[in-house]
Image (tube, rainbow, N blue to C red):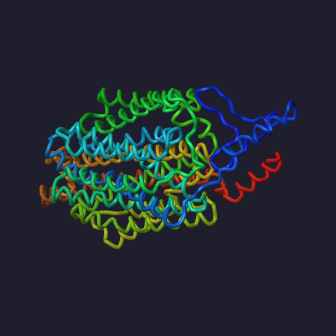
């Protein structure tokens, strides 16, 4: 009978080189020549056992955190910055049908490739892969900034999404690798706060750049911001000695990227986005193209699950990692929680711009209460998790607060007072922020060291997948309900002309009774989006009871366990 695998820091005394079939495990048995085996183990002790964790502290940790927070700020700005630039882009290329893709292309790329980046971080040099992700993002920015056609803008946005996916994964893994485990919740909370602040500020900056210079500067601005980040990473990011890539041949690394699974998930997401962008808008729901893409989405999604199951450890989402209840429950909870977050993030500004008649910049200012209290909630929960190591109670609290905030937000109407919508933002922002980063803390903290990169990739795939799905769902709900309402209340107006008019322009194009009816249709569409977000929040409350009552392990407990096992085998 084989003895237990001994884990020290990030190294294990039981190792298997992927792709070679060469087993380096040490069998501690009661049969055979155990003295020779113990001697072999002692010979390997220098390289496999006594490598102590080398965590960054003081100024070095501060500089690393500043750098990865800057990279988070850079990528998050780009997620939201496109919103206020879209009208100017459509004016340039006269491609109204492409509007949905300017935002969806990024979310699609992030959702589809997050797990792939997790594999790259696991098998290749971490620092080089992280730098490569930022490089890909900057290349995408150049492609979008210099785009001669609408299709080129979409391609640039997709390349940006590919880079964003790697940067987001890498930032969280950096925190896990370079800092002491007891600091992880607080540092992840700070990073999440910076990321969300940047996401909300994106439309404000995008509006200022589009109005003051050109929409192309929404992409060009990444170049002067990205350069210093690369330099800071080269200077200060030192991967600790106890972190080493998993050994594997290039053939095995290629197989581990799970290209069949990647192809299926991209194809299924494209079909889903097309179906919801066509349905009820440019095509009827009964149109053959809409039905075909919906059927293909279902078939391709089923095929993806089957392929992932057959791929085993080479899957983007290894079945082994998803089996624990703590993992799959947190994955689903994160998917639902982010549904409310992204739908509010995109449609609360539309409420301010269309219904309240505010400018793009002013609508961003009016979302600051949501933003500020998201940050407060995020940092508070990070501190509490760091001190208590508890998870599920905070997730249940988050879901309850988020549901209460969404209920208040749902009650918004054309005549709602400033006190009402600010109060709703405060409660909702605090609630969403209080639990948003906990699923990542849970999955990382409860995973084996060698599984952290892949587990992190799965969580980012979940969060970005939530954005990819629910932003498109929200757009479909909003457009269909608005068009349906206009056909009933304002049959004299062209509903598609109203749909094509920017949120800030409707008060310039329409007036009198027509404006009242258009605003009423906008409000109907927005309220139905908020209904979807409220439903997701309620489901998150119910799912919180499924999440097990586990605590994050104390680092000291892990070290004591290693020492006990070492003493037992005379190490």
Query: Taking 255 as reference, is 44 left or right?
Result: right
Total marks placed: 0
- The answer to whether residue 284 is above or below residue 183 is above
Residue 26 picture location, percent across and down = 75, 36
Q: Nearer the viewer, residue 460 or 251?
A: 251
- The answer to whether residue 526 is above or below residue 150 is below
Q: Residue at x 41, y 64 (%)?
A: 408
Q: Nearer the viewer, residue 45 or 373?
A: 45
Q: Quadrant of the N terminus?
A: top right
Query: Taking 532 as reference, is 48 left or right?
Result: right
Q: Residue at x 34, y 63 (%)?
A: 412
Residue 293 in view of the camera: yes
Q: Which quadrant of the view contains residue 269?
A: top left
- The answer to whether residue 481 is above or below residue 311 is below
For this orientation, the residue located farthest to the right is 31
Q: Residue at x 45, y 62 (%)?
A: 63
Residue 570 picture location, percent across and down = 82, 47
């Amino acid at each position: 009978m084989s003895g237990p695998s001994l884990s020290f820091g990030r190294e294990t005394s039981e190792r298997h080189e992927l792709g070679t079939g060469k087993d380096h495990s040490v069998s501690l048995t009661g049969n055979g020549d155990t003295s020779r085996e113990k001697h072999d183990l002692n010979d390997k002790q220098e390289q496999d056992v006594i490598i102590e964790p080398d965590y960054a502290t003081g100024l070095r940790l501060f500089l690393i955190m500043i750098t990865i927070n800057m990279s988070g700020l850079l990528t998050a700005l780009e997620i939201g910055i496109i919103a206020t630039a879209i009208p100017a882009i459509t004016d340039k290329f006269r491609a109204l049908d492409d509007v949905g893709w300017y935002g969806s292309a990024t979310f699609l790329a992030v959702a589809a490739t997050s797990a792939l980046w997790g594999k790259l971080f696991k098998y290749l040099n971490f620092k080089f892969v992280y730098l490569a992700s930022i490089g890909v993002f900057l290349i995408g920015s150049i492609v979008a900034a210099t785009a001669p056609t609408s299709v080129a803008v979409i391609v640039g946005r997709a390349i940006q999404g590919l880079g964003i996916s790697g940067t987001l994964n890498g930032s969280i893994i950096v925190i896990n690798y370079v800092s002491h485990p007891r600091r992880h919740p607080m540092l992840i909370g700070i990073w999440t706060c910076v990321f969300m602040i940047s996401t909300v500020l994106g439309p404000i900056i995008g509006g200022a750049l589009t109005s003051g210079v050109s929409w192309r500067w929404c992409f060009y601005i990444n170049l002067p911001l990205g350069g210093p980040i690369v330099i800071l990473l080269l200077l200060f990011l030192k991967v600790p000695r106890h972190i080493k890539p998993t050994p594997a041949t290039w053939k095995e690394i290629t197989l581990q990227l799970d290209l069949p699974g990647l192809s299926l998930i991209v194809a299924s997401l494209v079909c889903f986005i097309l179906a919801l962008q066509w349905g009820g808008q440019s095509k009827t729901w009964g149109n053959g193209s809409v039905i075909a893409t919906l059927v293909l989405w279902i078939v391709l999604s089923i095929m993806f699950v089957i392929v992932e199951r057959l791929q085993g450890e080479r899957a983007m989402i290894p079945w082994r990692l998803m089996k624990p209840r703590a993992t799959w429950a947190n994955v689903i909870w994160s998917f639902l929680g982010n549904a409310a977050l992204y739908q509010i993030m995109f449609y609360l500004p539309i409420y301010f711009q269309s219904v309240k008649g505010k400018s793009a910049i002013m609508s961003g200012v009016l979302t600051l209460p949501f933003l500020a209290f998201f940050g407060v909630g995020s940092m508070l929960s990070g501190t509490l998790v760091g001190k208590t190591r508890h998870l599920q109670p905070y997730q249940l609290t988050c879901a309850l607060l988020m549901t209460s905030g969404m209920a208040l937000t749902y009650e918004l109407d054309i005549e709602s007072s400033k006190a009402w919508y600010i109060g709703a933002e405060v409660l909702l922002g605090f609630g969403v922020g209080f639990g948003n980063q906990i699923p990542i803390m849970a999955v990382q903290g409860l995973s084996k060291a060698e599984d952290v990169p892949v587990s992190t990739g799965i969580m980012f795939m979940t969060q970005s997948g939530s954005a990819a799905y629910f932003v498109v769902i929200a757009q479909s709900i909003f457009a269909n309900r608005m068009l349906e309402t206009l056909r009933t209340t304002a049959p004299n107006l062209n509903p598609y002309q109203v749909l094509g008019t920017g949120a800030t322009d409707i008060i310039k194009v329409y007036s009198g009774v027509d404006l009242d009816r258009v605003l009423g249709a906008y409000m109907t569409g927005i309220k139905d989006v908020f209904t979807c977000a409220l439903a997701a929040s309620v489901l998150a409350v119910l799912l919180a009871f499924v999440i097990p009552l586990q605590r994050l392990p104390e680092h000291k407990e892990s070290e004591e366990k290693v020492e006990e096992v070492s003493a037992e085998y005379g190490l």
